Image (cartoon, rainbow, N blue to C red):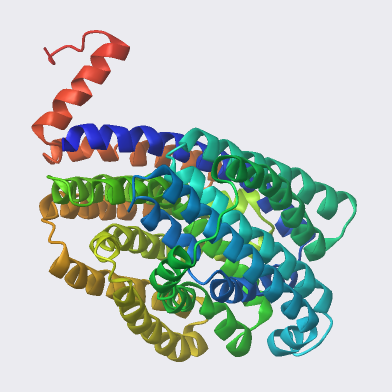
Amino acid sequence: MSVYVEMKSLGKHFMVYGVGRILGKLAAFFLIPIYTSYLTTEAYGTLELLELTTYVVGMFVAAGIGQAVMRFYYETNISFQRRQIVSTSLISVWIISICATVILILNASHFSMMIFQGVENTTLFKLIFISMMISIVNEIPLSFVRAQQKSFLFTMLSLLQLIIALGLNIFFLVILGWGVQGIILSGILSQGGIGCFVLIYTLKYCGIHFSWDWFKKMLLYGLPFIPAGLGYFVLNFTDRFFLQRFVSLSDVGIYSLGYKFGMILSPMITEPFLSIFQPKMFELADGEGAQAFVSSVMTYLVFLEVFAGLGIAVLIQDVIHIMSDRAFWSAGGVVPLILLSYVFVAGNAVLQVGILIRKKTKWIGYMVAGAAAMNVILNYFLIPWYGYWGAAYATVISTFFLLIICYFLSNRIFPVSYEWKRLIKIILLATAIYWTAGQIHLGCSYLSMGVKIVLVMMFPFLLYLCRFYNHAETNKLREVLLRFHGRIPGWR
């Protein structure tokens, strides 16, 4: 296997996934001024807790089957068996999710009482459970599209869903004034419309088949993802519940807005990257040079994550002042810490590859459980003293702990020699630029943003001065520059 060829293929699909995600996030950004203008901090906090509740419940309903589809799809080259795997998972998830949703809707008032100490949000829980069901059943057809490595189709579907949701959000929230209920309803309609199309597409290719053998294999593979997913939930989201109990629902809303800016690295870079990296890695798992491929991927992913995260971190205070109501301005302070934690999460996604390839998924559950326990303890002690700053500190510490544990466990069964010198150069230079940007105070948000953007854009060029790029990368960069800009003096 040629590492260069596979990296080129990975990069092509990543660009398609990435462009779609970035355009989607730009569309979603238009909603931030609307949300912060038409929702109070308390209402924003309510929406966050509703979504987090269904996140937890959805993990148990899906039973990890969605993750199993990708792994077993590449375990066979027989077309009929691949169709059977997708169809079996689709039928299973439909039956389980519909039954579970009916039960959840009948008990919506109990969830409202448990989370909000009152039944006034019962209707919102019923709607959010329906939205959850649609999201779960859509996961299988979308996983099938990813397994086919049809990045353009996947991106167009995701982008279309975001555009529909954007329009419906504006209609329900601004024109009709339906508040949180309107936001949930727009999600139901946008996901439902795309879900109908992708379901028809999947059934056309796969038909309707059910295999108990494949179902049992996928269930055994996927079940460890439930405690792992629960652990990830604890790592990333339980701080909202601690904030509600120890501080206030308003603090939940402020912190949630900051967290949304911080986690932007996930849809912009990590998710499009994983959309193609996971199927590509399963395809190349036992090939020659697989470890070298993973090592190169880690370096490039960290470069992209840190470069994008650096830009967000240095601009966030100015952006929040421009885009949101004054009540939300303090949210910008925690964004750099959340960005750092999502860089750790992205690195962890690469480190896990050995565990996934060798089907040791129970290890993921163990290590995430340990990091989650640490996060709960830190939240319990830090939030009463430091509020949402304590929540941010707890997230960074526990995600870094998870990264370290994952490295040692995964490298035991799938050894990879990572490019540590290059990774350290990325981190040290980004830290220096972030500190320098923090010293810039020009009194005008737009002027400050302009200067900081120039500073951030110097990052890849300063890496060149630090001898970061290898010979092949330097030659490729020269080739690209010459192709688009003609002959560059001194670069012959």
Considering depth in this image, is 489 or 435 the residue closer to the camera?
489
* Res. 445 visible in picture: yes
Considering depth in this image, is 191 or 200 the residue closer to the camera?
200
Judge left or right: residue 492 versus residue 131. left
Q: Residue at x 33, y 60 (%)?
A: 349
Q: Is residue 223 above or below residue 309?
A: below
Q: Residue at x 84, y 53 (%)?
A: 172
Give how far across and how far down residue 243 sits, in percent: 58, 82
* Res. 441 visible in picture: no
Q: Is residue 394 above or below residue 210?
A: below
Identify the image quadrant of residue 256: bottom right
Identify the image quadrant of residue 330: bottom right
Judge left or right: residue 232 versus residue 142. left
Q: Please count the marks in the image.
A: 0
Give how far across and how far down residue 75 sits, in percent: 32, 53
Judge left or right: residue 161 versus residue 255. right
Instruction: Check the picture and name the quadrant holding the N terminus.
Output: top left
Q: Is residue 320 above or below residue 13?
A: below
Q: In this view, which residue lies farthest toward the top? A: 486
Give how far across and how far down residue 422 sits, in percent: 15, 49
Q: Residue at x 42, y 54 (%)?
A: 313
Instruction: Check the picture and name the quadrant holding the C terminus.
Output: top left
Q: Residue at x 37, y 45 (%)?
A: 78
Give how far across and how far down residue 335 sits, in percent: 47, 62
Q: Is residue 255 above or below residue 165?
A: below
